[in-house]
Amino acid sequence: MKKWDWSLADILDLEFFFNRDQELPGQGDEETPAKRDRRIYLAVKDSCPQKDENGRRSCLLRRWLSARRAEFHEKTGDNLLPGRVFDELIRLCSWIFFLVSLVGGWGAALSFLAYAGKTPVNVATFLAIFVASQLLVLTILLFFLAAGRLRTRPPLPLTYSLVRRAVFLLASKISRLT
């Protein structure tokens, strides 16, 4: 059975359509949301698995979202939904972050390695700053990726609830100060 993975863009679009249905109930010649949803359901119900109820619900919801996106595109002639805007902004911010990091790292290494031949260069400091720090970041990244793949249940619910309470307590104290 195929697992239906939801992205943040899908969830944003889903919320957009839910809110749009609440704000704009069917009026006049337009189809009511209930009739439209029934029409979409009848069109997609046979394309989802019958055995697993949770998988079926997720599949139906995803098909409904795809149909709503298609209808939105037909009505407006535009593909500009919140999820797509979010995806493009994340991609753009990633490239900007990459370029700024590249230029910043290049500038830092250049300023550190600028050598006029008058004073000795400490290679150990260079290695500690520019190589060891990158290896540390890579190790932390690999640890969290491996931990995420190995996790099968929610991580430490007691710790999560304690941290959550501490954050709310801290937020309330900060709000009293302002």
Image (tube, grey):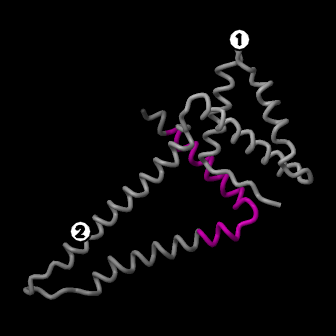
Location of the C terminus (image quadrant): top left
Q: Residues within 10 Å of mark 2 (few under 14, many from 20)?
A: few
- The x, y position of residue 139, in whole percent, is 51, 76
Who's the residue at 34% across and 61% down the image? 99
| Cα separation between marks 2 and 1 | 63 Å
The answer to which of marks 2 and 1 sits earlier in the sequence is: 1
- First to last magenta residue range: 145-173
- The x, y position of residue 109, in whole percent, is 25, 74
Q: Secondary structure at mark 1?
A: loop
Mark carried by residue 28:
1
| Residue 93 falls inside the magenta stretch | no
Mark carried by residue 107:
2
Please report contact status of discs 2 and 1: CB closer than 8 Å, yes or no: no
Specify the quadrant of the image occupied by residue 77: top right
Q: Secondary structure at mark 2?
A: helix
Mark carried by residue 9:
none
Compared with residue 35, is residue 151 higher up or lower down, i.e. above or below?
below
Specify the quadrant of the image occupied by residue 113: bottom left
Q: Nearer the viewer, residue 178 or 115?
A: 115
